[in-house]
Amino acid sequence: MPSTPPARSRFAPSPTGRFHIGGARTALYDYLLARQTGGQFILRIEDTDQKRFDPSAERELMDSLRWLGIDWDEGPDIGGPCAPYRQSERKPIYQRYAADLVQRGHAYTCFCSSERLAQMRQEQQKRKQPPRYDGTCRSLATAEAQKRIDAGEPHVVRLRTPRQGKTTAVDLIRGPITVENADLDDYILLKSDGLALYHLAAMVDDREMAITHVLRSSEWLPTFPLHVLIYQAFEWPQPVWVHLSVFLNPSGKGKMSKRHAVDGKGGVASIFPLDMRADGYLPEAVVNWLALMGWSYDDHTELFDRPSLIEKFSLAKLTPSPAAVNYSKLDHFNGLYIRALPDDELARRVAPYFAQAGLKAEADQLRRLAPLIRERIRTLEESIELAGFFFRDDVSPADDLLPGKDLTARQAAQALSRAQALIGASGAMDGALEASLRALADELGLSAGALFGLLRLAVTGQPVSPALLESMAIIGQPTVLQRVAALASRLEAFAA
RNA sequence: GCCCCCAUCGUCUAGUGGCCCAGGACGUGGCCCUCUCAAGGCCAAAACGGGGGUUCGAAACCCCCUGGGGGCACCA
């Protein structure tokens, strides 16, 4: 374990929509870093844009994080030494810092209207020029500016970006990134409504909250030097900056949609943790999967439980290149974690899905079922399709499944009656019954598979099910006999 | 149009100048096991984008090209 000083990391999402795996992965890395170093992981809500604010977003975000087991030490719900943790509640703080910048000449007041700015941009683009602020208010005298402010004229505060020279910003996994200051803009720091924009708010908060490591999306790379410039204007030491690469669609083409992602096989898989929960994914599988999208430990270890993730995680092993999401790998991990679950734990996890499907499944029934389904499901949700018949009264198979492969209805009906007799004579429906059924198949000139398949259809109503004899044992002899008889007579009618 | 980032099997990745005619995993194909479906076991196909350098020696370092991604708001 490296003896690094405690890190203070923060996840600072904007509550503007559904919470997706991109954010979850950033939060996970933040969390792992804090836990590994014995530091703190802070949740901060960046809600400075009232226009895009979505009141349900914060709820979903917290539910998702909790489900994934990513817990925060300070945040809007639990408070902390740097409260408040919602930017909309920190307005005066940003104004104070903005005023400081203006006073020291690193920022200036701008009175240009959005309309004029929009028009300006349009013309610049027409002339194939990069869209930049033209500097109209940059050289306004302080007294003149103050007069217009006092007169109540709407205004914003802009950063006075150096016109010459270069700025170098250092990203932990990419190294130094140097840009011409001339390519930067005089970005707006404070809007005319008095609220800060990200560029100011995030820098100020990271400073005030003593954040040591800033992990954020690589979408911030183009404005990274600007942020460094803001830190320099304040004369603050830089935190460790880490830009995480974006997720690409499963095809590898294009940035992952913020709405949904399409599986390679054509099915639609969700990118939202809460949907994944509904779809039967285990949080530990999702975490393991997410952790490996952009980080690796060595050339062969892929399975990480929470403690080993905390122990082994390392910023130095993050990859700078974008990663396509791979849902079949998620399925693989999910299967692995499901198979590792003890009977009663699997039963406990699967219970909500049965309830959701309207099936009345008792805990002890599910516990007996666990060994039968464990190896056959990739998601908890699949247990319904596989084993729902245990809890349904009507299991009669669809017509097109009958009478069974390579069988006539009469043969099938006869085979079922004979099997019924054997089952009736069998007490335990165990290995002895299996042996006599095999003997019966032999006698009837059927393959064991054909006979079992027929019985499977009768007992489960499905062509695919858990192991037949074990399933029958759980269903119980009376019900099994009843179902076998029912299908036998149905086939009888078919034959007639 | 301008700026920035990235580049190893289809996908996620290992690789920090010789251990690599490139390792692991998912997926794919084959075989085995088998009452279905899985799970499991074994095997296989599958990559250093191209061109120049540097070096005794490049997947690794530098440059160019190409390709991919991101950004250019009183959004974050």
Image: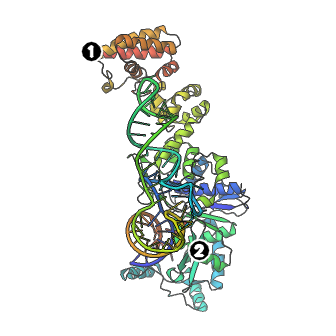
**Secondary structure category for the residue under label 2:** strand
Give, as a three-letter code, the residue at label 1: Ala
* Among numbered discs 1 and 2, the one appearing first in the sequence: 2
Q: CA distance from mark 1 to mark 2?
A: 81 Å
Is residue A404 among what the camera can see?
yes
Q: Nearer the viewer, residue A377 or A208?
A: A377
Which residue corresponds to the image point at 61% horizontal and 31% vertical from the top-left?
Answer: A344
Residue A419 appears in which quarter of the rendering?
A: top left
**Secondary structure category for the residue under label 1:** helix
Which residue corresponds to the image point at 66% horizontal and 51% vertical from the top-left?
Answer: A310
Query: In the rendered image of this protein, does residue A405 appear above or below residue A437?
Result: below
Residue marked by disc 2 = A169
Chain designation of label 1? A
Query: In the rendered image of this protein, does residue A169 appear above or below residue A138?
Result: above
Single out the residue that lies furthest toward the left.
A496
Whole-percent x, y for residue A56 in the image: 53, 54
Residue A238 appears in which quarter of the rendering?
A: bottom right
Q: Nearer the viewer, residue B59 or A469?
A: B59
Quarter of the rendering occupied by the N terminus of chain A: bottom right
Left-right relation of A429 to A264:
right
Which residue corresponds to the image point at 55% horizontal and 39% vertical from the top-left?
Answer: A336
Residue marked by disc 1 = A495
